[in-house]
Image (cartoon, grey):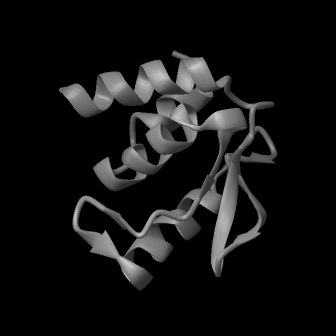
């Protein structure tokens, strides 16, 4: 298991759901969701914020990617992990 996989294995279920959303999205870009696993508003914003502060090998895991209808858009940093690999890891972790 490499450093990024090890870090992903330590994330909360809500963080994993957000990463799965990015992994399934077109080009790894998605708007902030309105609700995930019962979290909304500031609580969900806090989860996304914590993901945006994750630094692995000197790079951020997710990057802010503009706004859409008053919501921030986020992009997966594919320099760190490919979308298909992230999809496999998050789907496996969420199915356990």
* Quadrant position of residue 25: top right
At x 64% / y 81%, what residue is drawn?
Answer: 70
Q: Position of residue 96 (x, y in %)?
A: 18, 26
Q: Position of residue 43 (x, y in %)?
A: 37, 78
Q: Is residue 58 left or right of residue 23?
A: right
Q: Position of residue 91 (x, y in %)?
A: 35, 26
Specify the farthest residue to the front. Answer: 69
Q: Nearer the viewer, residue 93 or 56?
A: 93
Above or below, comparing residue 37 to residue 89 in the picture: below
At x 60% / y 28%, what residue is drawn?
Answer: 3
Q: Is residue 28 left or right of residue 66?
A: left
Q: Nearer the viewer, residue 88 or 67?
A: 67
Above or below, comparing residue 61 to residue 14 in the picture: above
At x 54% / y 27%, what residue is drawn?
Answer: 86
Task: Count numbered badges in the picture.
Answer: 0
Specify the farthest residue to the left. Answer: 96
Q: Position of residue 21 (x, y in %)?
A: 48, 43
* Quadrant position of residue 22: top right
Q: Is residue 64 left or right of residue 95?
A: right
* Quadrant position of residue 69: bottom right
At x 73% / y 31%, what residue is drawn?
Answer: 80
Above or below, comparing residue 89 to residue 28 in the picture: above
């Amino acid at each position: 298991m490499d450093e990024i996989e090890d870090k992903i294995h330590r994330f909360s279920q809500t963080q994993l759901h957000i990463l799965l959303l990015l992994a399934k999205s077109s080009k790894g870009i998605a708007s902030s969701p309105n609700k995930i696993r019962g979290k909304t508003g500031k609580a969900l914003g806090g989860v996304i914020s914590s993901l945006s502060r994750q630094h692995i090998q000197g790079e951020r895991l997710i990057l802010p990617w503009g706004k859409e209808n008053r919501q921030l858009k986020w992009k997966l940093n594919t320099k760190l992990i490919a979308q298909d690999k992230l999809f496999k890891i998050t789907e496996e972790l969420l199915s356990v």
